[in-house]
Amino acid sequence: MAPDISAPAETDQPGADREEDRQSPRDAGNDVIIRGESVVKEYQTGAQTVQALKGIDFSIQPSDFVAIVGPSGSGKSTLLNLLGLLDVPTRGTVRLRGTDVSTFSDGDRTTKRKHTIGFVFQSFYLIPTLTALENVEMPRMLDRTPKKTRERAKQLLRRVGLGDRLDHYPDELSGGQKQRVAIARSLINDPAILLADEPTGNLDRETGDDILELFDELRAEENVAVVTVTHDAYVAEEADRVVNLVDGEITDADEAESNGVVEQ
Amino acid sequence: MSWLRRVAAYFPTVVLARRNLSRATARSLLAIAAVVIGVVAIGTIGMGGEAFKQDQMEAFEGFGGTATVYPVYHHDGSGSINGDFSRQNINRMRQVTDGTTVLPIVERWDTLVQTPTGEVIITAQVKGLDNPGSFYDAQSGTIPDNWKRSAIVGSRIAENNDIQPGDRITVSVNGSFTRKFSVAAVLEPQGFADQLRADRTVFVPLDEFDDPEYDSAIVRVDPTTTSVDAATESIESEFNTRERNVYVQKVQEQREGFEKTFETINQFLIGVGSISLLVAAVTIANTMLMSAIEREREIGVMRAVGYPKRAVVSLLVAESSILGIIGSMVGVPLALGIGMVLNQVLLGDPLAFTAAGLRYVAIGAVFGIGTSLLAGVYPAWKAAKKQPVEALD
């Protein structure tokens, strides 16, 4: 169920990272990419402390397709931010391949994020002044390997079916095409996890289906784990596991489906 | 173009920055215009000031090796004030300065000069001098080698009263003489640097004054071979033994004083010009802040996909620097163009740029780029500091 992550040959750096991280004794056996234990996240709003997450456990393994569902304000985005190393828990631990992320500096988290995590957003967030190809290259633009990056970006755009749209600007692309560009962008550094925040939220059903299909292909071919926050029931249906968040806690409603993912 | 793209790929920050600027063209152009105004203001004021200074300093040409020695007047205890130079004093000066030209001057105020038609020239001064040819060139007529019984008239006096060589003017010196003189020559205009103020003077030979007391003496050396300082120091140590009897004023010192004054004025004006660059900096800071706020989510995405803070700072600072560089690139030729006009007007040669003048253009350009860069730092830091999760919410 948890095959090894096969890093493409040209991505030495992320591959090396993973190799090194895998040394960690705790997760060495089961290949867990990211694991959370008793994770609490609190926010200060004025004099009040709001608990967005109230001590949850989770773990993500390669090729997982996890859907996080729940009403607004239930802590879905907070969980996604923690998984994406965009935030750190107030209490409890989040471990990236065995290493507690709270030990990372801001710069470390940025680097780990770059090499481990791909982001897909509901509103795509493509840079309007860059072509589809350049948008895909964007996360690696500062790496000073323009030729390698360009080749990989072209390959990814062809992979998502946009081989004929390389030089189009975002405003020349449809919503589905933009999301495909965004997915290609999220894959440029060969991440282990793809975090998708309402990836189909701005798309019609048919285009949404295409995106979900693409996720399936990526999981099968690249062993990428996909974690998505969604309101769409049909996206949740497609997922292997559903994490149902209510008021910052994982409810047991979908226990059958969440086996293994949510460790109570 | 493809080679350009290949090169550009190695400077991704610059490429991203340039593209971002093209997003709000009007805003970028206005920010550039502000820099252009600042660069032109500093460059033009600096260059214009230098041209004006040069124009004024031309008046000192030819007076480099000259100093005037004045007597210091002392109360002699018997009720009268004593101090004018005697013939012996002048001879002592000649001895101690070893062959330097020392020209005694008689300068009288109780005088009257009348034109050939009998009009009184109120503004004319009368001075007795031995050898004006060693100082001045004639504009018309000739300065006689062995000068006796004629007058030499300054340019301003001649012009205002329509006096030509050959005319006869009447000079009265109270208590000495009243005599008609034939005008031998009218002098070239000398300007304000001339210590004898020849433009407003009617010169008569010293011999006209019986046993004169001299009001001052001009000491003159060839400035290309000797310094006037040695001569004046000898005179001062000879005469100022127990008390100060002579006082020396060098044209060079006067010139330096003028130069300092011009410099101060110029610096003040450039300071005023710099305010326009300060305004440009504010404009750019505002432009960059707006741009950073508009692109908050985009910057959040960049941070999320692995751009470190310093990459975001570099990007925004690159954007503001590009505004400064373009502003300077437009401003410098404009400033040089205006400088050429000023050179033409003040110095008669559009290409009469001085190193000092050009330096101000360079300073303007450097400050233009520098202030733009600095103006981008705060917005950049603010944008980079924002946590990606906040920017994306």
Image (tube, rainbow, N blue to C red):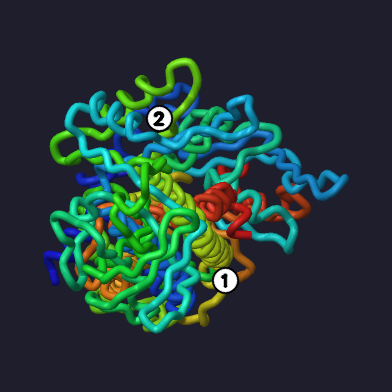
Q: Nearer the viewer, residue B321 or A170?
A: B321
**Looking at the rendering, in which quadrant would you find the C terminus of chain B?**
bottom right
- Where residue B108 appears, as percent x and y from the top left, is 46, 53
Q: Residue at x 43, y 40 (%)?
A: A112
Q: Is residue B156 visible?
A: yes
> Are the residues under badges 1 and 2 in a single subunit?
yes
Which residue matches tag 2? A21
Q: Nearer the viewer, residue B300 or B119?
A: B119
**Above or below for B238 versus B112:** above
Badge 2 amino acid: Asp
Q: Residue at x 46, y 50 (%)?
A: B261
Task: Quote the CA–CA distance across marks 1 and 2.
Answer: 35 Å
Q: Nearer the viewer, mark 1 or mark 2?
A: 2
Label 2 marks which chain's residue? Answer: A
Task: Check residue A255 in the rendering and tell me which mark sits there, or answer none.
Answer: none
- Where residue B27 appears, as percent x and y from the top left, is 49, 75
Q: Secondary structure at mark 1?
A: helix
Which residue matches tag 1? A234
Disc with the residue nearer the chain's start (1 vs 2): 2
Q: Residue at x 73, y 50 (%)?
A: A251
**Location of residue B55 (image quadrant):** bottom left
**Looking at the rendering, in which quadrant would you find the N terminus of chain B?**
bottom left
Q: Is residue B365 visible?
A: no
Q: Secondary structure at mark 2?
A: helix
Identify the residue at the far right of this view.
A47
Horizontal side of A237 relative to B328 (left or right) equals right
